[in-house]
Amino acid sequence: MKIGELARCAGVTIKAVRYYESLGLVTPRRLANGYRDYTEEDVRLVREIRTLSNLGIPVESTRPFLACLATGRQHADDCPESLAGYREAIDELTERIEALTTRRAALVRHLKQAAHRNSSIPLPDNGEHPTMSDLYRLPENLPVPEDDGAARHLPGLKLPRITLSSTSGETVGLDTLGTGRTVIYLYPLTGRPDTDLPHHWDSIPGARGCTAETCDFRDHHQELLAAGAQGVFGLSSQDSGYQREVVERLRLPFAMLSDPRLSLAAALDLPTFEFAGLTLFKRLTLVIRDQAIEHAFYPVFPPDAHAQQVLEWLRSNPVT
């Protein structure tokens, strides 16, 4: 058969066949007129080269396999030399994988270092906002959440006997917060500077702005305490390990509470929403007094000014 027919039968290109010939892997006989003449055995060799190449074995390293076939073996890997070829290819791939893994780890490390360095926000001491990354700056024209009445039943309700893990390493019983006022702001989830925000996150009313809201509570923490709050907590369904990164990066003066099972939502019938297979808290802030909900802020918008809204309410409603 001619070279074109061989290429079609073996599933390769004519250029590939000529390359194999240049390496001496395939040697067709020559007709009297000088044309190459290929046999079914040549088809078998080319197919074997193609199969081994698809496994990651370089074309030049297929010689032991082809030599095995030349001895009359049924399979190209029936010979010890072929098994050695497999091991050599495996060792080479292992080295490449280890090198790529090391490079990937280095890239991840540099990404985290750069992202966190560039997003580091010093505590404000001059009244000015430092340069912020996208996590801290809210985009324009965010959809405004509507009041669907999902929090109207909350004022007056007693807090359930639920104990949650805190980023301080302790547990906090919500029914044992004391007789003073405690502010708990619930949020869906915080992002990280080295990770893109979830796709379409900004299009969900009330979803975007958890980090900006947290920064606002941080920046006004002392004023909230001075206005009568004995404590401030953030609360989400993210685990404490994830939350601790936020506490450390933003240098928060208060702890975060983790409620991965949304037990508080179930006990108080709090508003939630579904996203990417997750059930998340809708943004909501509770003012707790004497183990009961004194006031509920819902919906919350804009989140980056919400701590100031809570502060104004505390000052307008002093404890007598």
Image (spheres, grey):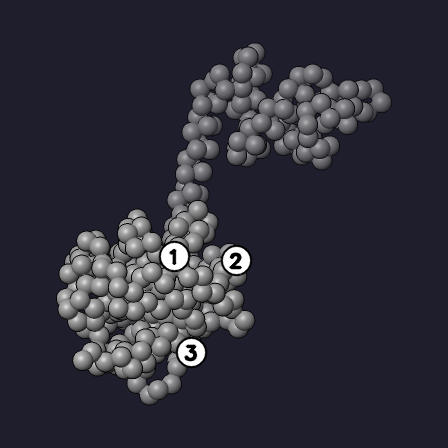
- Seen in the picture, residue 228 relative to 272 is either above or below; the reply is below
Residue type at numbered disc 3? Thr
Furthest residue in direction right, as rendered? 33
Report which residue position mark 1 lands on: 271
Would you say residue 103 is visible in this rendering? no
**In the image, what residue occupies the spot 44% across and 43% down?**
96
Q: Residue furthest bottom?
A: 126
Q: Residue at x 73, y 32 (%)?
A: 14
On residue 34, which mark appears?
Answer: none
Label 1: which secondary element: loop
> How many other residues sit within 10 Å of disc 2, few (<14), some (14-19) or many (≥20)?
few
Q: Is residue 230 above or below residue 186?
A: below
Q: What residue is at 27 percent from the left and 79 percent from the top?
A: 317
How far from the left and from the top, in percent, is residue 122?
32, 77
First in sequence: mark 3 or mark 2?
A: 3
308 vs 48, nearest the viewer: 308
In this orientation, which residue lies closer to the viewer: 143 or 72? 143
Give the residue number, with chain letter if any, for mark 2.
Answer: 200
Residue that label 3 marks? 131
Q: Are marks 3 and 2 in contact (CB under 8 Å)?
A: no
Residue 314 rendering spot, x and y as whole percentages: 27, 78
Measuring from the top left, give residue 150's x and y in whole percent. Answer: 40, 59
| Quadrant of residue 76 within the rendered picture | top right
- Closer to the chain start, of discs 1 and 3, is 3
